[in-house]
Structure formats: structure tokens, C-alpha cells
Amino acid sequence: MTETSDLTSVRASYDAVAVEYARLVGTELARKPLDRAMLAAFAEYVRGDGVRGDEGRGGRAVADLGCGPGRVTAHLDGLGVRAFGVDLSPAMVAVARRTYPGLRFEVGSMTALDVADGVLGGVLAWYSTVHTPPAELPVVFAEFARVLAPGGHVLIAFKAGDERIRLEHAYGHPVELDVYWTPPDLVADLLAGAGLTEVARLVRGPDPRENSPQGFLLARKG
């Protein structure tokens, strides 16, 4: 698959900010109880949802797509989920491997995962679709559905709204990033179009360091 210029920009931008990003967001979940609650619910579903072929600790594997420095992958591991991380940025993956040497992290794109059909118990996209234009989300969600086993779950965290913001500087570095705020109803509809049925959603107000409401949507395959 030919890589788009958007993906090239996202990779270069996150390569540039990887170390500073990891430092700034490393303990972020500790001050966000509702975010942790959604992750806990997701973990409980993927540990015990009865997906065919579950075995061993945490059932089928769960992919944290756009894992960045690995903090949420590690959080899922702490919840008893057999999680691994995938990120477009080699620098982010390097940080994750150094920080969490006991976990698996790979360089890859969520638009073309190196994962067989129907093998995962869960897919987490923790703000990793925010740089994807809404018109391109059906391709991404179809890839999520492809790798999920029947009965598997996906949890998406995103900026709730209907706006595009251009970032040219972030985390102390020049970047080239578009950030998309997406209406929760649109996210649910696009997931449904990929065969992923909404289970629950949460929209919370922004905390003091955020500039938009935050959306979380849990869906199930088949």
C-alpha cells in the first residue's frame, strides 16, 4: 500500500516529539478517573467476553494501535490483558521498548496491520485516530474489524466535536499535524458500517489541560 503524505507527516512529527511527549503524558491517566473507568470496562470485556479460542492470561491478544510511548499498553497489562502495542513512529516504539521491556511493541500502520484475520480479542485506539480525516475512518475501522475475532471489542478515545485544528508546534518541536474533532454519532455510525456494534459511549468535559470534550466509544464485532 502506498503511504499517504498525511501518514508521513504524522510519523515525522511523532518521531520528533517522542521523548518529550512520553515525559509529559506518562502519568496522565492518574488524574483521569473516567478514562480509567472506560479502560477497565474494555479490559473486563476482552478478558471474559467468551470470544472463541480464548486461552491463557487475558484471553486473546489485544492490540493498542497508535500506542505511542506504551503507557496505555502497560495500563492494560496491569489490568490482566495480554496487550501489545503498534505505532507508526519508530521513535515512539523505541521509547516504549525502553520503558516497558517486558511488553511487545512493533512499528506499523493501523491502516494495514501485520495481523491475521479474526485473531484479536480487542483493539484499542486511544486518540490514535485523531489525525485521520473522517472520510478515511471507514478504511481504518474496516481494518479493526478484520483483525478482531467474532465477539471481540474495540475501544476508541477521540476528541468530540466537529472541527479541524492545524498544529505546527507541539511538545517543544515543530510538527505538521491536523487534529480532527469528530462527532460521537458519526464515530458510532462508521463503526457500525464496519460491522462493529456500539456497546457504550461516554463524553466528558475537558479537563484543565484539554481544549475539547473527550469521547469514548466501545463497540463489539458480531
Image: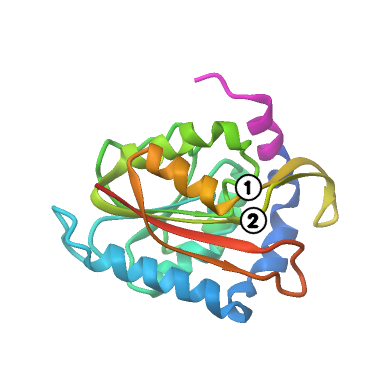
Q: Residue at x 31, y 71 (%)?
A: 44
| Label annotation for residue 159 | 2
Question: Is residue 125 rendered to the left or right of residue 23?
Answer: left
Q: Nearer the viewer, residue 46 or 199?
A: 199
| Amino acid tagged 1 | Val
Q: Which residues are magenta?
A: 1-11
Residue 100 makes an appearance in the image: no
Question: Is residue 137 rendered to the left or right of residue 204?
Answer: left
Residue 172, x across and y down, in percent = 85, 56
Q: Residue at x 26, y 67 (%)?
A: 47
Q: Is the Cβ of the residue at disc 1 closer than 8 Å to that at disc 2?
A: yes
Question: Is residue 209 rendered to the left or right of residue 184?
Answer: right
Residue 187, x across and y down, in percent = 51, 47
Q: Mark 1, mark 2: which one is toward the viewer?
A: 2
Mark 2, secondary structure of its residue: strand
- Dominant secondary-structure state across the stretch colored magenta: helix
Q: Is residue 120 above or below residue 117?
A: below
In the rendered structure, does residue 78 fall within the stretch colored magenta? no
On the image, numbered disc 1 is attached to which residue?
130
Q: Residue at x 52, y 50 (%)?
A: 185
Q: Nearer the viewer, residue 128 or 56?
A: 128
Residue 93, x across and y down, in percent = 56, 50
Question: Is residue 60 rendered to the left or right of residue 161?
Answer: left
Count the numbered circles shown. 2
**Mark closest to the chain's N terminus, 1 or 2:** 1
